[in-house]
Amino acid sequence: MPANKPNFRTVSAQIQNWAQRLPALAARLAQEVILFIYPPTCAACSISLDFEKSGPFCPACLKTLELVSEPYCPTCGNPYSTEGTAPHLCGDCLGGVHLFDRARATGFYRGLLREVIHRFKYGGQTFLARPLAEILEASAKELTRLHNIDLIVPVPLHSKRLRQRGFNQAALLARHLGSALKISVDYASLKRSRWTEPQTGLTRRQRALNVKGAFDLIRPEKIEAKSILLLDDVFTTGETVDQCVRVLKKGGAVEVAVLTVARTVAL
């Protein structure tokens, strides 16, 4: 007897199943082609990496990165000067210096991490946004869980600085991080409305005066009743992010957590 032939419904279901899988298969094929032509390299030394097993840095460079780890202030994330210290608020947080609800940084702004950030921010190597965003993911997930983050907001640049640099480093980081975490990014609501001089070399008081009143909220309806993840590249004294937090909370944000790639700390 002739073998049973698949009926119309079976064939139709198989075709539909393949049709649904085609976008994923095509995306995977495209990824494999890209990796074949442009194999991944270490963000610091450019050595070739095993895509399936490695992160954005090779093992040797990863060992030299000075990453922030506990113990640190549970609010601002400032590491304590001595190991084994029980968690407690630092002097700034006890004094109510900061306006954010919590802040975290991935590493210290020195050594290899500082070099990579400089190449990204001042050297125009914008491809470094992706690996730097990757090392932010763990802290971003922690803050998202603790604060039920609704929206990522990058610290904005003044239009003059944006024209000079050609890009906003915080916005590039936010784009990659938002895509990875499936969280929307608001690039437009927070605006730097006043030109400020670079903060490098300024005292804490000078930094505070330099950025005072430098930010405005032009779309408060996008921020109202939201928990915000404010993103920047480097945390120094926190004056810049505090000014942003002030504006965001005045506009109706419920909570604002701050995340940066690195922070400067006087240990």
Image (tube, helix red, strand yellow):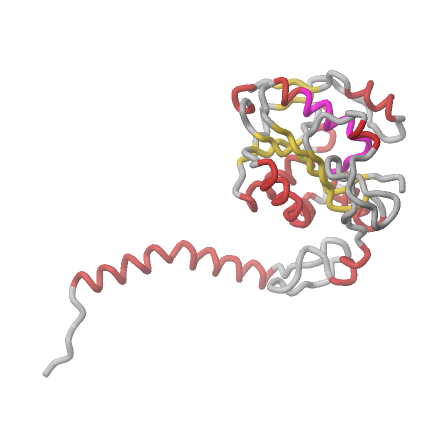
In the image, residue 203 lies at what x, y percent? 89, 26
Is residue 218 at all visible to an observer of this figure?
yes
Residue 238 picture quarter: top right
Judging depth in this view, the residue of 236 and 98 nearest the camera is 98
Residue 152 picture quarter: top right
Q: Does the segment drawn in magenta span residue 255?
A: no
Q: Residue at horizontal 32%, vertical 56%?
A: 19
Is 30 rendered above or below residue 187?
A: below
Q: Which residues are magenta?
A: 233-246
Q: Residue at horizontal 82%, vertical 18%?
A: 209
Q: Residue at horizontal 72%, vertical 53%?
A: 43
Task: Give the total number of marks visible in the rendering.
Answer: 0
The furthest residue to the bottom: 1
Is residue 167 at all visible to an observer of this figure?
no
Q: Could you tell me which quadrant the N terminus lies in?
A: bottom left
Q: Residue at horizontal 65%, vertical 65%?
A: 50
Judging depth in this view, the residue of 99 and 217 nearest the camera is 99
In the image, residue 208 lies at what x, y percent? 81, 21
Q: Is residue 143 left or right of residue 238?
A: left
In the image, residue 8 lies at what x, y percent? 16, 62
The furthest residue to the front: 86
The furthest residue to the left: 1
Residue 40 picture quarter: bottom right
In the image, residue 180 lies at what x, y percent? 56, 46
Judging depth in this view, the residue of 209 and 131 nearest the camera is 209
Q: Could you tell me which quadrant the C terminus lies in?
A: top right
